[in-house]
Amino acid sequence: MSPYTGVFAPTTTPFDPATGDLDLESLRNNARHLVATDLAGLVLFGSTGEGVLLDDDERVAGLEAVREIAEGKLMLAGVGAESTRATVRLVRRAAEAGADAALVPPPAYYRPQLTVEALWGHYSAVADTSSVPVLLYQIPPVYSGVELGVGLVAELSRHPNIHGIKDSTGDLEAMQSIREACAGDFAVLVGSGAVVHGALEVGACGAILAIANLAPDECAEILAAGMAGDPRRGEILQARLAPLHRAVVGRYGVPGVKTALDLIGLVGGPPRPPLLPLPAGDRDEVRAALEAAGLFAGQ
């Protein structure tokens, strides 16, 4: 069984509302809540964690702070940069701070020149120098515009230090093609909370879900139901959580997830500029989505 079997929560990153600095105590408190659930682990500083808006030293401080309390859970670090050199440096620092694996999105700025050969060279160089396993990260095209094609992923899956991929596109056919083309122990993790049940049916072994910050045990139960051969239970849970993903994550992104955390009694707080907090009307929509999912009762 892959060590990445299970559901991981890509944690949000709290900031001090007065100074905008990283709020380590709130980060630890949110992590304690998640570590006490049935999740397999946490992802720090990915897309939901506003990783691209953080300084290098902030990433290290956050990883070290959460490593202290994440005993028994895997801790993955979202690390990526536009140059291979910078990505190698970030992965090294994340490993030194206690990350168990590195989740690496593709560079995107020079998209027309990012050929299959260029991306293969980038990921191979990162994996060659990393002391921890590397996971590829297929970001939805609306955010990145760089596609990690099935052929490229299949080639990279043969690297001994590239252990899997997070696919956040929600494209089940693509996930199935990746699973069939890659080495047997290569982990495919779904990144969309709207299609977890379907992803398991086409060969995914786990998930990295923003809604796992809000409903960690329910998300973990979808996967457990699939592994136990109880598809009906998985379908029921998926039907409950898919609208929450679409309404909060799909529609509002990071500000939506942070608003939802505030509403259920955890620390969301403001996003880091240039992202803006949700206006009052949109907060009402998030509250309604939580209520429909049975996660908000006027706390």
Image (cartoon, rainbow, N blue to C red):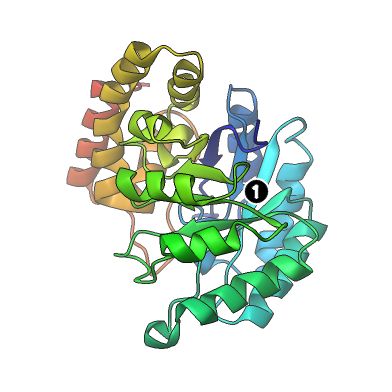
Examine the image and state in which quarter residue 135 appears.
bottom right
Q: How many marks?
A: 1
Residue 192 shown left or right of residue 156 in the figure: left
Q: In this rendering, is residue 29 above or below 91?
A: above
What residue is shown with label 1? Answer: 76
Examine the image and state in which quarter residue 55 appears.
bottom right
Examine the image and state in which quarter residue 125 appears.
bottom right
Residue 56 shown left or right of residue 288 in the figure: right
- In the rendered image, which quarter contains the C terminus? top left
Residue at point 26% right, 23% down? 239
Q: Front-most of 239 and 152?
A: 152
Q: Position of residue 185 (x, y in %)?
A: 63, 42
Residue 14 shown left or right of residue 255 in the figure: right
Q: Front-most of 229 and 3?
A: 229
> Label 1's element?
strand
Q: In this rendering, is residue 122 above or below 191?
A: below
Q: Position of residue 62 (x, y in %)?
A: 68, 53
Q: Front-most of 19 and 109?
A: 109
Q: In this rendering, is residue 290 above or below 98?
A: above
Q: Position of residue 210 (x, y in %)?
A: 43, 41
Q: Position of residue 128 (x, y in %)?
A: 75, 69
Residue at point 67% right, 61% down? 159
Q: Amino acid at mark 1?
A: Leu
Residue at point 43% right, 82% down? 109
Q: In this rendering, is residue 77 above or below 70?
A: below
Mark 1 crowdedness (10 Å alpha carbons): few <14, some 14-19, many ≥20: many
